[in-house]
Image: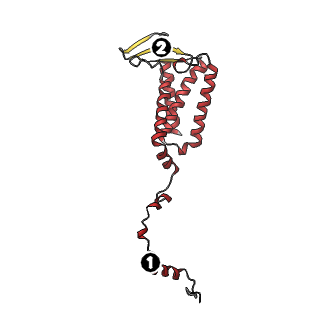
Amino acid sequence: MIGFCAVTAFVIAADLITKHLVAAGMELNSTITVIPGFFDLTYIINRGAAWGILAEKQVLLTVFTVIVLAALVFYVIKKHRGIGKLELVSIAMIVGGGIGNLIGRVFDGYVVDFINIRCISFLNIFNIADIGITVGCVLLVISVLFFGKKESRTASGSPEGSAADYSEIRWDQIDVSEDAHEHAVKNDTPEGETGNGR
């Protein structure tokens, strides 16, 4: 849980600090070119979600965000001993990014966006919280698809030599001869009795 809280706090802090610096140092709708034709800082406000969707549904968007974040945190608290590291980091990034944008929506009524990747036309202007959510979702998919079963077995703490190991017993190494059978019968016969019941 310490690692989860640390990653979540880092994403929130990075998001809030960068938003504050942009809002304090730039005029709204202004642009600072960092790498010509590739990367700009463009200060805008977004009253909706990604690509401005649900801009007129602030209450709905806020409630939905709170429900999703609460569900993720509850899942981590309840299952944290059985969650792999990659999955834990991915959820922490999603939660951190969600909280970062949620703070802006609740206190300001909008989210500050400023990262403008000009060389990718379909990308809208976004912020650090959006990066956390996007990267977290990608890592979560990778964790589930490629590491889910392995991490599940590791987290369950199955000891070596479990029932699965018995599948490798070589039956040709088991002595099933008559001498072995008679030896077993003698060892199981109580003192004072013979194997034929006399």
Q: Is residue 171 above or below residue 60?
A: below
Q: Earlier in the sequence, mark 2 or mark 1?
A: 2
Quarter of the figure with the C terminus: bottom right
Quarter of the rendering containing residue 69: top right
**Amino acid at circle 2:** Tyr
User: Which numbered tag is attached to residue 43?
Assistant: 2
**Amino acid at circle 1:** Ser
Badges 2 and 1: C-beta atoms under 8 Å apart?
no
Image spot of residue 27 (x, y percent): 48, 9
The secondary structure type at the circle numbered 2 is strand
The residue under the point 63% across, 25% down is 63
The secondary structure type at the circle numbered 1 is loop
The residue under the point 52% across, 32% down is 8
Image spot of residue 90 (x, y percent): 49, 35
Q: Which residue is mark 1?
A: 177
The answer to whether 53 appears left or right of 26 in the picture is right
Quarter of the figure with the N terminus: top right
Q: Residues within 10 Å of mark 1 (few under 14, many from 20)?
A: few
| Nearest the eye: 165 or 86 | 165
| Nearest the eye: 79 or 121 | 121
User: Which numbered tag is attached to residue 44?
Assistant: none
Q: Is residue 116 above or below residue 4?
A: above
- Most distant residue in the bottom direction: 198
The residue under the point 48% across, 41% down is 85
Q: Nearer the viewer, mark 2 or mark 1?
A: 1
